[in-house]
Image (tube, grey):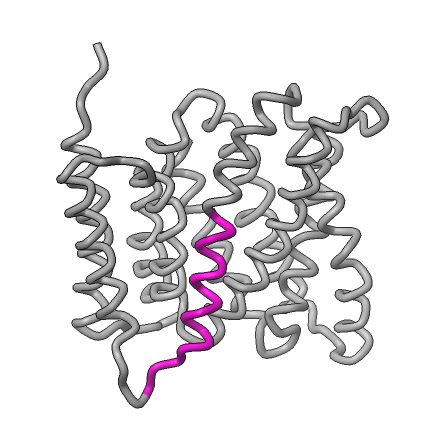
Amino acid sequence: MMLASGLSTQLGAAIGSLAFPVLGPVGVVAVRQCVAAVVLLPVGRPRLRSFTRRQWGPVLLLAAVFGVVNLSLYTAIDRIGLGLAVTLEFLGPLTIALAGSRRRVDLGCAALAVAGVAALMRPRPTADYVGMGLALLAAACWAAYILLNRSIGQRIPGTQGTAAAAGLSALVYLPIGAGVVVHHTPSAAAVGAAVTAGVLSSALPFLADLFTLRRVPAEAFGLFMSVNPVFAAAVGVLVLGQKLDVAAWLSIVAIIAANAISILARPRRA
Protein backbone atom coordinates (compact mmCIF):
# COMPACT_ATOMS: atom_id res chain seq x y z
CA MET A 1 0.00 0.00 0.00
CA MET A 2 2.87 2.39 0.80
CA LEU A 3 4.60 1.60 -2.50
CA ALA A 4 1.41 2.20 -4.46
CA SER A 5 0.82 5.45 -2.58
CA GLY A 6 4.33 6.72 -3.35
CA LEU A 7 4.17 5.89 -7.05
CA SER A 8 0.66 7.36 -7.38
CA THR A 9 1.77 10.60 -5.69
CA GLN A 10 4.78 11.18 -7.94
CA LEU A 11 2.98 10.22 -11.14
CA GLY A 12 0.14 12.58 -10.24
CA ALA A 13 2.59 15.40 -9.51
CA ALA A 14 4.26 14.89 -12.89
CA ILE A 15 0.93 14.91 -14.74
CA GLY A 16 -0.25 17.95 -12.81
CA SER A 17 2.91 19.88 -13.75
CA LEU A 18 1.91 19.55 -17.40
CA ALA A 19 -0.87 22.06 -16.66
CA PHE A 20 1.50 24.68 -15.17
CA PRO A 21 1.84 26.68 -18.44
CA VAL A 22 -1.95 27.20 -18.51
CA LEU A 23 -3.13 27.16 -14.88
CA GLY A 24 0.09 27.76 -12.98
CA PRO A 25 0.95 25.91 -9.74
CA VAL A 26 -1.80 27.76 -7.81
CA GLY A 27 -4.48 26.77 -10.30
CA VAL A 28 -3.37 23.14 -10.36
CA VAL A 29 -3.36 22.98 -6.56
CA ALA A 30 -6.85 24.53 -6.42
CA VAL A 31 -8.22 21.90 -8.81
CA ARG A 32 -6.33 19.17 -6.96
CA GLN A 33 -7.79 20.16 -3.59
CA CYS A 34 -11.33 20.31 -4.96
CA VAL A 35 -11.00 16.92 -6.64
CA ALA A 36 -9.64 15.41 -3.43
CA ALA A 37 -12.64 16.78 -1.52
CA VAL A 38 -15.13 15.50 -4.11
CA VAL A 39 -13.62 12.00 -3.85
CA LEU A 40 -13.00 11.86 -0.11
CA LEU A 41 -16.15 13.47 1.30
CA PRO A 42 -18.56 10.80 -0.03
CA VAL A 43 -16.16 8.08 1.12
CA GLY A 44 -15.54 9.48 4.60
CA ARG A 45 -18.97 11.05 5.16
CA PRO A 46 -17.73 13.08 8.14
CA ARG A 47 -20.26 13.86 10.84
CA LEU A 48 -18.98 17.33 11.55
CA ARG A 49 -21.53 18.13 14.26
CA SER A 50 -20.35 15.16 16.30
CA PHE A 51 -16.69 16.22 16.30
CA THR A 52 -15.37 17.27 19.68
CA ARG A 53 -12.86 20.05 20.29
CA ARG A 54 -10.17 17.39 20.72
CA GLN A 55 -11.02 16.00 17.28
CA TRP A 56 -11.37 19.35 15.52
CA GLY A 57 -7.85 20.43 16.50
CA PRO A 58 -5.86 18.01 14.30
CA VAL A 59 -8.48 18.21 11.52
CA LEU A 60 -8.08 22.00 11.20
CA LEU A 61 -4.30 21.71 11.32
CA LEU A 62 -4.34 18.98 8.66
CA ALA A 63 -6.54 21.15 6.42
CA ALA A 64 -3.95 23.93 6.64
CA VAL A 65 -1.14 21.48 5.96
CA PHE A 66 -2.93 20.13 2.87
CA GLY A 67 -3.06 23.57 1.32
CA VAL A 68 0.47 24.69 2.20
CA VAL A 69 2.26 21.45 1.32
CA ASN A 70 0.69 21.20 -2.12
CA LEU A 71 1.23 24.84 -3.05
CA SER A 72 4.83 24.92 -1.84
CA LEU A 73 5.71 21.60 -3.48
CA TYR A 74 4.09 22.37 -6.84
CA THR A 75 5.73 25.78 -6.98
CA ALA A 76 9.06 24.12 -6.15
CA ILE A 77 8.50 21.53 -8.90
CA ASP A 78 7.86 24.35 -11.34
CA ARG A 79 11.18 26.00 -10.38
CA ILE A 80 13.63 23.14 -9.69
CA GLY A 81 12.03 20.02 -11.17
CA LEU A 82 10.23 17.01 -9.71
CA GLY A 83 13.24 14.94 -8.63
CA LEU A 84 15.03 17.64 -6.62
CA ALA A 85 11.82 19.05 -5.12
CA VAL A 86 10.65 15.67 -3.82
CA THR A 87 14.15 14.78 -2.56
CA LEU A 88 14.22 17.91 -0.41
CA GLU A 89 10.59 17.34 0.63
CA PHE A 90 11.56 13.89 1.83
CA LEU A 91 13.59 15.47 4.63
CA GLY A 92 10.25 15.79 6.45
CA PRO A 93 9.61 12.08 6.99
CA LEU A 94 13.34 11.49 7.45
CA THR A 95 13.33 13.94 10.34
CA ILE A 96 10.37 12.12 11.88
CA ALA A 97 12.24 8.83 11.53
CA LEU A 98 15.43 10.08 13.17
CA ALA A 99 13.96 12.52 15.70
CA GLY A 100 14.74 11.69 19.28
CA SER A 101 17.16 8.89 18.45
CA ARG A 102 20.46 8.86 20.31
CA ARG A 103 21.99 5.94 18.46
CA ARG A 104 25.30 6.73 16.83
CA VAL A 105 24.18 5.09 13.61
CA ASP A 106 21.18 7.42 13.38
CA LEU A 107 23.34 10.46 14.06
CA GLY A 108 25.62 9.27 11.27
CA CYS A 109 22.61 8.84 8.99
CA ALA A 110 21.44 12.35 9.80
CA ALA A 111 24.91 13.68 8.96
CA LEU A 112 24.85 11.78 5.65
CA ALA A 113 21.45 13.22 4.77
CA VAL A 114 22.62 16.74 5.65
CA ALA A 115 25.64 16.25 3.40
CA GLY A 116 23.31 15.25 0.56
CA VAL A 117 21.18 18.34 1.09
CA ALA A 118 24.28 20.56 1.24
CA ALA A 119 25.39 19.16 -2.11
CA LEU A 120 21.97 19.86 -3.61
CA MET A 121 21.93 23.42 -2.28
CA ARG A 122 25.58 24.23 -3.06
CA PRO A 123 26.17 27.71 -4.53
CA ARG A 124 26.16 27.68 -8.34
CA PRO A 125 24.95 30.05 -11.07
CA THR A 126 21.79 28.03 -11.79
CA ALA A 127 20.80 27.42 -8.17
CA ASP A 128 17.19 28.40 -7.42
CA TYR A 129 17.15 28.96 -3.68
CA VAL A 130 13.54 30.12 -3.64
CA GLY A 131 12.50 26.79 -5.18
CA MET A 132 14.67 24.90 -2.71
CA GLY A 133 13.24 26.87 0.20
CA LEU A 134 9.71 26.04 -0.92
CA ALA A 135 10.65 22.35 -1.12
CA LEU A 136 11.96 22.54 2.45
CA LEU A 137 8.67 24.16 3.53
CA ALA A 138 6.90 21.21 1.92
CA ALA A 139 9.20 18.94 3.93
CA ALA A 140 8.07 20.53 7.19
CA CYS A 141 4.45 20.15 6.09
CA TRP A 142 4.96 16.48 5.21
CA ALA A 143 6.36 15.81 8.67
CA ALA A 144 3.29 17.49 10.16
CA TYR A 145 1.06 15.49 7.79
CA ILE A 146 2.45 12.19 9.10
CA LEU A 147 1.94 13.12 12.74
CA LEU A 148 -1.50 14.69 12.23
CA ASN A 149 -2.80 11.83 10.10
CA ARG A 150 -1.75 9.36 12.76
CA SER A 151 -3.41 11.45 15.47
CA ILE A 152 -6.64 11.73 13.45
CA GLY A 153 -6.65 8.00 12.82
CA GLN A 154 -6.54 7.44 16.57
CA ARG A 155 -9.21 10.01 17.45
CA ILE A 156 -11.75 9.76 14.63
CA PRO A 157 -13.16 6.52 13.20
CA GLY A 158 -12.93 5.65 9.51
CA THR A 159 -11.84 8.33 7.06
CA GLN A 160 -14.02 11.09 8.49
CA GLY A 161 -11.12 13.21 9.73
CA THR A 162 -9.12 13.17 6.51
CA ALA A 163 -12.25 13.81 4.44
CA ALA A 164 -13.21 16.78 6.63
CA ALA A 165 -9.72 18.25 6.34
CA ALA A 166 -9.77 17.84 2.55
CA GLY A 167 -13.17 19.55 2.38
CA LEU A 168 -12.04 22.51 4.46
CA SER A 169 -8.90 22.93 2.36
CA ALA A 170 -11.00 22.83 -0.83
CA LEU A 171 -13.27 25.59 0.52
CA VAL A 172 -10.24 27.86 0.90
CA TYR A 173 -8.95 27.10 -2.59
CA LEU A 174 -12.32 27.26 -4.36
CA PRO A 175 -12.36 31.08 -4.82
CA ILE A 176 -8.67 31.01 -5.70
CA GLY A 177 -9.33 28.45 -8.42
CA ALA A 178 -12.27 30.49 -9.71
CA GLY A 179 -10.02 33.53 -9.99
CA VAL A 180 -7.43 31.56 -11.96
CA VAL A 181 -10.11 30.32 -14.38
CA VAL A 182 -11.42 33.84 -14.93
CA HIS A 183 -7.98 35.26 -15.75
CA HIS A 184 -6.60 32.23 -17.61
CA THR A 185 -9.07 30.31 -19.76
CA PRO A 186 -8.09 26.67 -19.21
CA SER A 187 -7.86 24.09 -21.95
CA ALA A 188 -9.48 20.67 -21.63
CA ALA A 189 -6.02 19.06 -21.50
CA ALA A 190 -4.90 21.33 -18.64
CA VAL A 191 -8.05 20.67 -16.61
CA GLY A 192 -7.71 16.94 -17.26
CA ALA A 193 -4.09 16.97 -16.05
CA ALA A 194 -5.05 18.89 -12.90
CA VAL A 195 -7.98 16.57 -12.15
CA THR A 196 -5.76 13.52 -12.66
CA ALA A 197 -3.26 15.03 -10.23
CA GLY A 198 -6.04 15.45 -7.68
CA VAL A 199 -6.99 11.78 -7.89
CA LEU A 200 -3.48 10.30 -8.05
CA SER A 201 -1.66 12.70 -5.71
CA SER A 202 -4.37 13.52 -3.17
CA ALA A 203 -7.40 11.25 -2.97
CA LEU A 204 -5.75 7.83 -3.35
CA PRO A 205 -2.59 8.55 -1.25
CA PHE A 206 -4.59 10.22 1.53
CA LEU A 207 -6.76 7.14 1.97
CA ALA A 208 -3.83 4.73 1.67
CA ASP A 209 -1.71 6.70 4.17
CA LEU A 210 -4.54 6.96 6.67
CA PHE A 211 -5.07 3.19 6.77
CA THR A 212 -1.31 2.52 6.73
CA LEU A 213 -0.57 4.86 9.65
CA ARG A 214 -3.09 2.95 11.77
CA ARG A 215 -0.94 -0.16 11.42
CA VAL A 216 2.59 1.19 10.96
CA PRO A 217 4.50 3.42 13.43
CA ALA A 218 5.13 6.97 12.18
CA GLU A 219 8.90 6.40 12.31
CA ALA A 220 8.73 3.28 10.12
CA PHE A 221 6.35 5.04 7.73
CA GLY A 222 8.77 7.94 7.39
CA LEU A 223 11.68 5.60 6.69
CA PHE A 224 9.77 3.61 4.10
CA MET A 225 8.89 6.79 2.23
CA SER A 226 12.54 6.97 1.08
CA VAL A 227 11.22 5.36 -2.10
CA ASN A 228 9.61 8.67 -3.09
CA PRO A 229 12.76 10.45 -4.31
CA VAL A 230 13.53 7.42 -6.50
CA PHE A 231 10.02 7.42 -7.94
CA ALA A 232 10.15 11.21 -8.43
CA ALA A 233 13.50 11.14 -10.23
CA ALA A 234 12.39 8.25 -12.46
CA VAL A 235 9.01 9.83 -13.27
CA GLY A 236 10.70 13.18 -13.92
CA VAL A 237 13.00 11.57 -16.47
CA LEU A 238 10.42 9.29 -18.13
CA VAL A 239 7.34 11.53 -18.11
CA LEU A 240 8.71 15.08 -18.07
CA GLY A 241 12.11 14.61 -19.69
CA GLN A 242 13.86 16.29 -16.74
CA LYS A 243 17.52 15.39 -16.29
CA LEU A 244 19.62 15.53 -13.14
CA ASP A 245 23.37 16.04 -12.99
CA VAL A 246 25.76 13.62 -11.28
CA ALA A 247 25.89 15.68 -8.07
CA ALA A 248 22.11 15.66 -7.80
CA TRP A 249 21.95 11.88 -8.25
CA LEU A 250 24.68 11.41 -5.62
CA SER A 251 22.73 13.63 -3.23
CA ILE A 252 19.57 11.57 -3.78
CA VAL A 253 21.56 8.38 -3.16
CA ALA A 254 23.04 9.84 0.04
CA ILE A 255 19.63 10.80 1.44
CA ILE A 256 18.12 7.42 0.55
CA ALA A 257 21.16 5.59 1.96
CA ALA A 258 20.69 7.43 5.26
CA ASN A 259 17.23 5.90 5.51
CA ALA A 260 18.30 2.44 4.39
CA ILE A 261 21.15 2.27 6.90
CA SER A 262 18.93 3.50 9.72
CA ILE A 263 16.15 1.00 8.96
CA LEU A 264 18.59 -1.93 8.63
CA ALA A 265 20.32 -1.03 11.87
CA ARG A 266 17.07 -0.64 13.80
CA PRO A 267 16.77 -3.35 16.47
CA ARG A 268 14.12 -5.97 15.79
CA ARG A 269 11.28 -6.27 18.28
CA ALA A 270 10.61 -9.68 19.71
Q: Residue furthest right?
A: 49
Residue 264 pos. (x, y %): 16, 32
Query: Per the image, is 134 magenta?
Result: yes
Residue 174 lies in quadrant: bottom right
Quarter of the image containing the N terminus?
A: top left
Q: Is residue 47 left or right of residue 250?
A: right
Who's the residue at 67% across and 64% down the image? 191
Quadrant assignment, res 245: bottom left
Instruction: Tell me what residue is drawn at x 62 percent, y 74 percent.
Output: 24
**Residue 143 percent coordinates (x, y):** 46, 45
Residue depicted at 54% across the width and 48% down the height? 200
Of 182 and 138, the residue lying toward us: 138
Majority secondary structure in the magenta region: helix
Number of numbered discs overlaid on the protein picture: 0
108 sits left or right of 150 in the view: left
Q: Is residue 163 magenta?
A: no
Say if 203 sits above or below 127 in the image.
above
Could you tell whether 71 is left or right of 164 in the image? left
Residue closest to the far top: 270
Q: Residue at the spot x=43%, y=62% of the render? A: 136
Q: Nearer the viewer, residue 234 or 100?
A: 100
Indicate the quadrant containing the C terminus: top left, top right, bottom left or bottom right. Answer: top left
Q: Position of residue 268 (x, y in %)?
A: 19, 19
Q: Is residue 194 above or below residue 48?
A: below
**In this picture, residue 127 sits left or right of residue 30:** left
Q: Please provide percent x and percent y for residue 129.
A: 40, 77
Q: Which segment did they paint magenta?
A: 126-142
For residue 98, what is the image quadrant?
top left
